[in-house]
Image: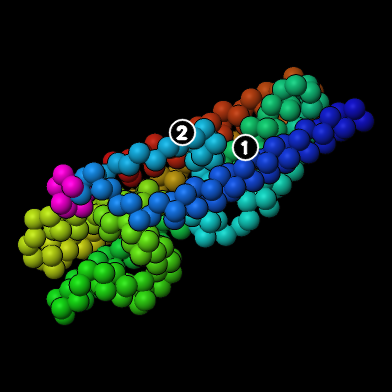
Amino acid sequence: MDRTLLLGTAAMLTIALVTGVLTLLKSGQARRLKARIASASALETTSLQATGLPSIRLQTNESRPLLERVLRFLRYHPDVPQAHTIPWYVVVVFGVLVAVLIARFLSGPLGLPRSILSGVLTGFFLVRSIFAFQYNSYVDKIFKQIPDAIGLMVRAIRAGLPVGEAMRSVAAELSSPLRDEFSRMLGDVAIGRPVDQALMRLYKRTELPEFSFLAVTLGMQSQTGGNLAETLDNLADIVRKRVALSKRAKALAAEARMQAGILMALPFIAALAMSQIQPFYIEQFSSPAGQKLALVGLGFSLTGFLIIRWLIKRAGQD
């Protein structure tokens, strides 16, 4: 009874803490948005007086408080709410419930302190995995639409339209989610932000380097001139090849993922077969020592599976 009360109290405190953190983040975002709108008329007067041209700096002086870093580590992006189709509070409550169940299940073989720690780590990893899956799916959809967007801009520019109208055509004719991101980027331009900086903000939201390429291309063209349509056409060809290469890398990594899944499931399949052939082997795990050994084996299996997935992901990024 005491363990159940303690686990329930820990779950309620965790939900309250996460809710308070996200509420503070939302209020801080609202204050920063009001400050940006109030100062939108001041467009870097110092740099404009020095050069007379817009800046194409790839970094800004925007601060990243500790709270935003924690949310980034959780793979929750409050600046891209449309990426998280499942509400954050549903994900958090689900993670807390799983953490409570894991802690209660492991309280016998591991003891209360270790079981609580294991439950918290499991719930944290589950919440992070759900947020990361939603965000990665959202970014992957945008990544596949970038070549079409740049190609549409090239055709609009060759037809005689300015760059702003070409971007508006992308926001009007393409489907979501890239249409929504371009509309948001055009909103930044409408309140006075230069195009290259608005694209860099889009790059920071999606973490796709293709948008930084596009920002540098437009910034350099605004300063040096040249055939913008030809430059964007070359960029579209490069991005199209990157998309094709990414698809091929995922296809080649599918075999490694399948092998990792088989290695993860093989011990359990072997244990099930042994329980049917020689049941007394499995009966040994009913004792406290056997349960601890089973948990250690499960932990090693999960660790190996996660390491293999991490290596596959790093190889795909390289």
Q: Which residue is mark 2?
A: 307
Left or right, 23 with reference to 188? right
Q: Earlier in the sequence, mark 2 or mark 1?
A: 1
The alpha-carbon separation of the residues under discs 2 and 1 comes to 18 Å
Residue 182 in percent (x, y) is at 37, 65
The question of residue 225 being in magenta is answered with no
To which quarter of the image does residue 11 belong?
top right
Q: What residue is shown at x 30% (from left), y 52% (from top)? A: 43
Q: What residue is shown at x 25% (from left), y 72% (from top)? A: 166
Placement of the C terminus among the 4 image quadrants: top left
Q: Does 273 sit above or below residue 300?
A: below
Placement of the N terminus among the 4 image quadrants: top right
Q: What residue is shown at x 31% (from left), y 75% (from top)? A: 169
Amino acid residing under circle 2: Ile
Residue 93 in percent (x, y) is at 71, 47
To which quarter of the image does residue 174 belong?
bottom left
Per the image, label 2 sits on a secondary structure element best described as: helix
Amino acid residing under circle 1: Phe
State which region is magenta.
Answer: 49-55
Q: Which residue is mark 1?
A: 124
